[in-house]
Amino acid sequence: LSGNIVTASPISDMNPVLMALDAYLILRSTKNTTRDVKMRDFFISYRKVDLKPDEIVDTIVVPPTTKHEFVECYKQARRREDDISIVNACFKACIEPSENGNEWQLKNINMVFGGVAPTTVAAKETENF
């Protein structure tokens, strides 16, 4: 999985999932120092990541979902049997009861897409709406 992440392919199936789930990486240097980098901040440009020459991915941390939090992932390929995506997406939504308690409302949402830009991207303006 680490190699898949560091390769930074814009059509990686896992990168939108990890970004939508608010995952972060613990990077370790040859000097045994560590730093945390959110997956959302890791992809700098096409196949370029925030990884220094003396660092490796030590740990991938995926926070657990919470109550009333739902995750859906989608992949479109040329053929059903094809492992290479054309585009893919992952959404994580959290809902909560409305003030009157009779309805549900969207508390927050993460919307992340692969294959639509040089890097995996979040729909930040929509997420912040």
Image: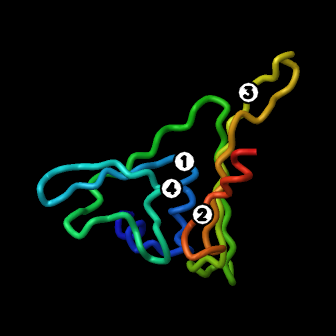
Q: Position of residue 57 (x, y in %)?
A: 29, 59
SS class of the residue under badge 2?
strand
Residue 21 is marked as 1
Task: Give the alpha-carbon distance from disc 2 to disc 3, as whole Å.
Answer: 26 Å
Pointer 4 residue: 40
Pointer 3 residue: 96
SS class of the residue under badge 1?
loop
Is there CB contact under 8 Å for labels 2 and 1?
no
Q: Position of residue 32 (x, y in %)?
A: 14, 52
Q: Position of residue 1 (x, y in %)?
A: 39, 63
Q: Earlier in the sequence, mark 3 or mark 4?
A: 4
How packed is label 1: few (under 14 Cα within 10 Å), some, or many (20 or more)? many
Is there CB contact under 8 Å for labels 2 and 4?
no
Is there CB contact under 8 Å for labels 1 and 4?
no
Residue drawn at point x = 60 percent, y = 63 percent: 121
Pointer 2 residue: 121
Task: Give the alpha-carbon distance from disc 1 to disc 3, as whole Å.
Answer: 18 Å
